Image (cartoon, rainbow, N blue to C red):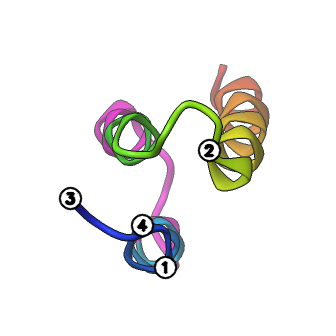
Amino acid sequence: MRTEQEIARSWSGLFNGQDLNDQILDQAEDLIGALRPESPLRHRLDAELAELRQKVT
């Protein structure tokens, strides 16, 4: 199981200088899924992902 710090680092790297596409958004969803349901980081990243999805569509 990955730590929240590792997931946060992976999240930042995922969106660093890349164009958004479905594959990146799916990877972001996988990162969120690796977090505990009650994790504040999970809630923050979930909100960020929702905003990013709106930008893509």
Q: Are marks 4 and 1 in contact (CB under 8 Å)?
A: yes
Residue situated in front as seen by the camera: 23 or 8: 8
- Binning the other alpha carbons within 10 Å of mark 3 as few (below 14), some (14 to 19) or many (20 upward) gives few
> Which quarter of the image is occupied by the C terminus?
top right
State the CA–CA distance, disc 2 to disc 4.
Answer: 10 Å
What kind of element bears circle 3? loop
Q: Earlier in the sequence, mark 2 or mark 1?
A: 1
On-image quarter of the N terminus: bottom left
Q: Which numbered mark, 3 or 4, is in the foreground of this view?
A: 3
The region drawn magenta spans: 14-27
Q: Amino acid at mark 2?
A: Arg
Separation of residues labelled 4 and 1 (CA atoms): 5 Å
Q: Which residue is mark 4?
A: 7
The outermost residue toward the left is 1
In the image, 48 versus 21, the foreground residue is 48
- The residue that label 2 is drawn on is 42
Task: Identify the residue under disc 1.
Answer: 5
Q: Which disc, if any, is residue 1?
A: 3
Question: Considering the numbered disc 4 on the image, is that residue within a helix, a strand or a loop?
Answer: helix
User: What is the spatial separation of the Cα atoms under label 1 and label 3, in whole angstroms?
Assistant: 12 Å
Residue type at the position of mark 3: Met
